[in-house]
Amino acid sequence: MNAAAPPPEALRAPLVVEFPFTRSLGPVQSAFLTGLRDRTVLGVRTEEGRVLVPPVEYDPATAAELRELVEVAATGTVTTWAWNPDPRPGQPLATPFAWVLVRLDGADTALLHALDAPGPEAVRTGLRVRIRWAAERSGAITDIACFEPYGSGAAPEVEPAPHEGRFDEPVTGIVVPARLDYTYGPGRAQSRYLHALAERRTVGERCPSCAKVYVPPRGACPTCGIATTDQVEVGPRGTVTTFCIVNIKAKNLDIEVPYVYAHIALDGAGLALHGRIAGIPYEQVRMGLRVEPVWSEDGRYPDHYRPTGEPDADYDAYKELL
């Protein structure tokens, strides 16, 4: 009797998703961020008289448009908190700190930010704090460097002061870097798929109920909800089912635009996968084009797909895979 093959090595890889998020600002957000640049904290008053900080343009309870700006104090009270012992890159402070919700004096809602404190024993609900302003300010939430403990006792009664929201050189737009660092574990099905790619083979898994072959495999059929353990080698050739022409160059991607990104139905697969098309002028790429993989220099995955020179596939052969 042959011994069972050992399971494939579990795979893990660090991944980073990063992009600049650009948005324009309406009158309320523009006034709020410009005010921070000038060391002024603005809120907005609702029809019921509540003061919301940070301000919003529409009442979350009634959806009414809000435009009545008011100025609140730079001091406030911690309403809840959580200690952060290991700050990550890009967070407000490089040393351990507390995330806090602070209700500024004169406001009815709380603002989330960092509190500079020597340790968790120095933080509590009800702690009085004040804003520590950044030395250089540009009109962003980071103009508040952090909060710091300040005084003691009960919060004073503060009546928000009306504010026109007018400043010199108002901030009208912001660019915020968004970044997500995480470790990806592909699981057994995709680990088998990746190990096969390293051997220049493309392996999917067949659903025992509907017989559809999923590439890349998912470990279960999303239609039938049944585990897929029957491995099937597909391709390597396939058919372009649909495609798009990319005209915007991505950061850190060494591919000249324009280029074509396509859905490719590999022979024997019941689902199209994504791939870049090269080796042909982009204006000649078409539905039904027969393609084959061109492997990366290290041979671990298809770098792109190129035409095989075969006649185009008949539409009826791939219409169910669009």
Image (cartoon, rainbow, N blue to C red):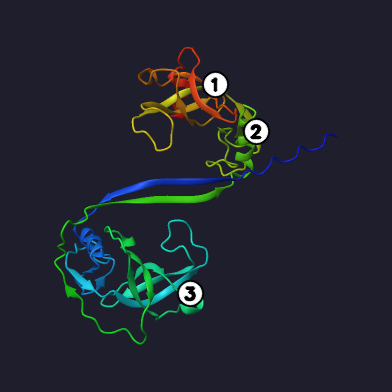
Up the image or down, 85 lies above or below 211; here it is below
Question: Does residue 162 appear left or right of residue 244 in this picture?
Answer: left
Residue 228 can be seen in this image: no
Q: Secondary structure at mark 3?
A: loop
Nearest to N terminus: mark 2 or mark 3: 3
Question: Does residue 302 appear left or right of residue 229 in this picture?
Answer: left
**Residue kind at label 3, given as amino acid type:** Pro
**Residue kind at label 1, given as amino acid type:** Arg
* In the image, farthest residue toward the right: 1
Q: Which quadrant is home to the N terminus?
A: top right
Q: Which quadrant is home to the C terminus?
A: top left
Give yes or no for contact between labels 3 and 1 (Cβ–Cβ under 8 Å): no
**Residue kind at label 2, given as amino acid type:** Gln
Residue 124: give x, y in percent of width and height: 45, 79
Up the image or down, 22 lies above or below 54; here it is above
Residue 30 — which label? none
Residue 237 — which label? 1
Q: Nearer the viewer, mark 1 or mark 2?
A: 1
Q: At 76% from the left edge and 37% from the top edge, which residue is drawn?
A: 5
Q: At 47% from the left edge and 79% from the top edge, which residue is drawn?
A: 122
The foreground one among 229 and 298 is 298
Q: CA distance from mark 2 to mark 3?
A: 56 Å
Q: Secondary structure at mark 1?
A: loop
* In the image, farthest residue toward the bottom: 153
Residue 228: give x, y in percent of width and height: 62, 39
The residue carrying mark 2 is: 231
The residue carrying mark 3 is: 118
Q: At 34% from the left edge and 33% from the top edge, which residue is drawn?
A: 248
Give yes or no for contact between labels 1 and 2 (Cβ–Cβ under 8 Å): no
Question: Does residue 241 appear left or right of residue 56 in this picture?
Answer: right
Nearest to N terminus: mark 3 or mark 1: 3
Specify the quadrant of the image occupied by residue 204. Answer: top right
